[in-house]
Image (cartoon, rainbow, N blue to C red):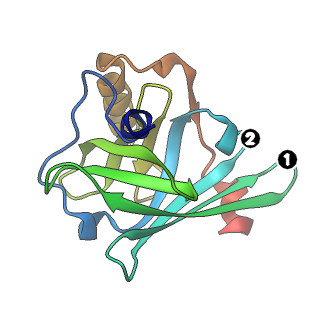
């Protein structure tokens, strides 16, 4: 069982997490700009992730999204802890009891304005921004970086963050 759990918190083969990562600078609100779709976010737009310190030194994670068609808000609270070498952009995240998954920052703006994040394998990928919109050139660059790492970018879903989200903010 331990090898399976270790694999769940690992990095996708052939990728590396950023170094010089400062967790305290990463805290705060992030807007999901695009993702590879998966069951736990299916149909959600206006997705945000809020990260704050926990008393135990970990990170409190609040993911929030809206099913715009149904007008329903979905909120999930989890916890995260750094893994890997100090200063490496890697966390293990849990929303379901003792089960953790890898959260790997593969690219990060110097000013922490955007991030390219992967799960433990190539089935999970997120393009995140500190603002609801990401400049088109930055978006293209992040997609190209992900494609170069063999992520299936042709199946990326762009997440609505505009006017439709205003009533939910």
The label nearer to you, 1 versus 2, is: 2
Looking at the image, residue 155 sits to the left or right of residue 144; the answer is right
Task: Say which of 131 and 11 sits in front.
Answer: 11
Mark earlier in primary sequence (1, 2): 2
Image quadrant holding the C terminus, namely bottom right
Instruction: Looking at this view, name the residue that lies furthest to the front.
Output: 1
Is residue 134 in sight in this rendering? no
Q: Counting other residues with Cα less than 10 Å from the Cα at mark 2, is it few (<14), some (14-19), or many (20 or more)?
A: some
**Residue sitting at x 43%, y 37%:** 8
Residue 147: where, in percent of width, then height?
36, 19
Instruction: Determine which of the numbered discs, if any, sits on residue 33 in the image.
Output: none
18 to 53, vertically: above or below: above
Q: Label 1 to label 2, Cα distance in Å?
A: 9 Å
Q: Secondary structure at mark 2?
A: loop
* Number of on-image labels: 2
Tell me which residue sits at (34%, 33%) in the image.
Answer: 142
Residue, disc 1 = 69
Seen from this angle, which residue lies furthest bottom? 55
- Name the element at disc 1: loop
Question: Which residue is found at the position 47% from the left and 18% from the top?
Answer: 152
Q: Position of residue 38 (x, y in %)?
A: 63, 34
Indicate whether 124 appears above or below 24. above
On screen, residue 112 above or below 158: below
In the rendered view, tell whether residue 14 sits above or below residue 62.
Answer: above
Q: What's the residue at 52%, 38% (across, down)?
A: 34
The 10 Å Cα crowd at callout 1, few under 14, some 14 to 19, many 20 or more, is few
| Residue 117 seen in this snapshot | yes
The residue beneath circle 2 is: 43
Q: Position of residue 6 (x, y in %)?
A: 36, 39
Q: Marks 1 and 2: CB-CB under 8 Å? A: yes
Tell me: 158 left or right of 102.
right
Residue 149: percent from left, percent from top: 30, 20
């Amino acid at each position: 069982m331990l090898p399976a759990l270790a694999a769940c918190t690992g990095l996708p083969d052939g990728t590396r997490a950023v170094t010089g990562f400062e967790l305290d600078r990463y805290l705060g609100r992030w807007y999901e700009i695009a993702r590879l779709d998966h069951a736990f976010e299916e149909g959600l737009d206006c997705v945000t992730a809020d990260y704050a310190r926990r008393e135990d030194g970990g990170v409190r994670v609040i993911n929030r999204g809206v099913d715009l068609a149904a007008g329903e808000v979905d909120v999930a609270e989890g916890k995260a802890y750094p893994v890997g070498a100090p200063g490496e952009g890697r966390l293990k995240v849990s929303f379901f009891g003792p089960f953790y998954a890898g959260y790997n920052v593969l690219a990060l703006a110097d000013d922490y304005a955007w991030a390219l994040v992967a799960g433990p394998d190539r089935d999970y990928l997120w393009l995140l921004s500190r603002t609801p919109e990401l400049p088109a050139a930055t978006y293209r660059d992040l997609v190209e970086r992900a494609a170069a790492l063999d992520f299936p970018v042709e199946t990326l879903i762009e997440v609505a963050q505009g006017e439709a989200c205003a009533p939910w903010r």
